[in-house]
């Protein structure tokens, strides 16, 4: 059940600003037809209540990473064994997200790595150790991601924006400083440039320059807002569609 109820203005803000967390209150106000101070009040309220949080959108395709979508079932394990397995997955670096599902498979996860041979090691780790427990799996390579704002909050889909990341684009070579910048941005997406510089041990100007270069290269899209749908009583459904002859 929802623990937060959104006003109409808050819904309109989320549709307008979800993909543009870097935009100023003035810029978002122009999209919404609202005054700057009103947008700032709405935004600060949503962030403070935990309805949204800013995250940096990083295009991992551009740096040569492959995204494997894996769906699997580990049979009828006891709860202790299942919990132990889920704790183990928390420690696997390539696991980007994992979900318990109620469909054909018990679990779904995203495994992102530049070393495709590690997929075999992951499958070995996914298989239960108990004798007699069946194991089923299905996997595929994700070739692109499209991220939309949440138009379901208002029912408006006309002219909506989107972010598209695709495999096959020219790759960007990262050095150690670039990797440090991406780690800091990922760990502290809501901080200021001064905070980033202090955490990374770099000067503010150097850090800003690196971020701008990564933006120009398409590695960083910018910041977007992650919406806590559970607080709104909204269920997420992932549908796997197979089409032949399209």
Image (cartoon, rainbow, N blue to C red):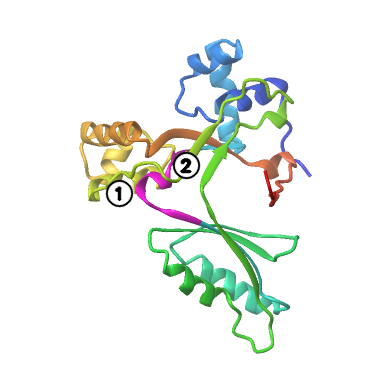
State the residue at coordinates (68%, 26%). 11
Q: Percent position (x, y) of residue 23?
A: 46, 23
Q: Percent position (x, y) of residue 95?
A: 50, 61
Q: Which residue does the numbered mark 2 point to in the structure image?
A: 166
**Horizontal side of residue 56 vs 42, given as left or right:** left
State the residue at coordinates (53%, 18%). 28
Single out the residue that lies furthest toward the right. Answer: 1
Marks 1,2: beta carbons within 8 A: no
Single out the residue that lies furthest toward the bottom. Answer: 131
Mark 2, Cα crowd under 10 Å, few <14 / some 14-19 / many 20+, is some
State the residue at coordinates (72%, 21%). 8
**Horizontal side of residue 106 vs 217, given as left or right:** right
Per the rendered image, the range of residues in magenta is 55-67
State the residue at coordinates (38%, 42%). 185
Q: Percent position (x, y) of residue 143?
A: 51, 48
In which quarter of the view is residue 30 placed? top right
Q: Quadrant of the C terminus?
A: top right
Single out the residue that lies furthest toward the front. Answer: 245
Seen from the viewer's position, the closer of residues 82 and 232 is 82
In which quarter of the view is residue 72 placed? bottom right
Q: Which mark is residue 179?
A: 1
On screen, 90 above or below 154? below
- 58 magenta-colored: yes
Q: Quadrant of the N terminus?
A: top right
Q: Which mark is residue 237?
A: none
Mark 1, Cα crowd under 10 Å, few <14 / some 14-19 / many 20+, is few
In which quarter of the view is residue 154 placed? top right
Which one is earlier in the sequence, the residue at label 1 or at label 2? 2
């Amino acid at each position: 059940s929802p623990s937060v109820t959104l006003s109409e203005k808050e819904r309109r803000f989320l549709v307008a600003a979800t993909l543009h967390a870097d935009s100023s209150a003035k810029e978002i106000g122009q999209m919404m037809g609202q005054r700057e101070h009103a947008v700032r009040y709405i935004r600060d309220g949503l962030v403070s209540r935990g309805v949204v949080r800013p995250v940096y959108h990083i295009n991992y395709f551009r740096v040569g990473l492959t995204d494997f979508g894996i769906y699997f079932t580990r049979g009828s394990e006891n709860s202790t064994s299942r919990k132990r397995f889920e704790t183990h997955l928390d420690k696997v670096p390539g696991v980007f997200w994992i979900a318990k599902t109620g469909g054909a498979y018990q679990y779904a996860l995203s495994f992102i790595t530049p070393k495709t041979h590690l997929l075999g090691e992951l499958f070995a780790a996914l298989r239960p150790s108990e004798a007699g427990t069946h194991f089923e799996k299905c996997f595929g390579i994700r070739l692109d991601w499209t991220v939309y704002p949440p138009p379901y909050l208002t029912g408006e889909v006309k002219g909506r924006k989107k972010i598209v990341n695709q495999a096959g684009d020219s790759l960007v070579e990262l050095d150690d400083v670039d990797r440090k910048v991406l780690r800091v941005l990922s760990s502290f997406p809501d901080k200021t440039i001064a905070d980033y510089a202090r955490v990374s041990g770099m000067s503010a100007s150097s850090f800003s320059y690196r971020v701008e270069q990564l933006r120009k290269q398409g590695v960083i899209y910018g910041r977007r807002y992650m919406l806590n749908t559970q607080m709104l009583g909204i269920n997420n459904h992932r549908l796997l569609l197979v089409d032949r002859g399209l």
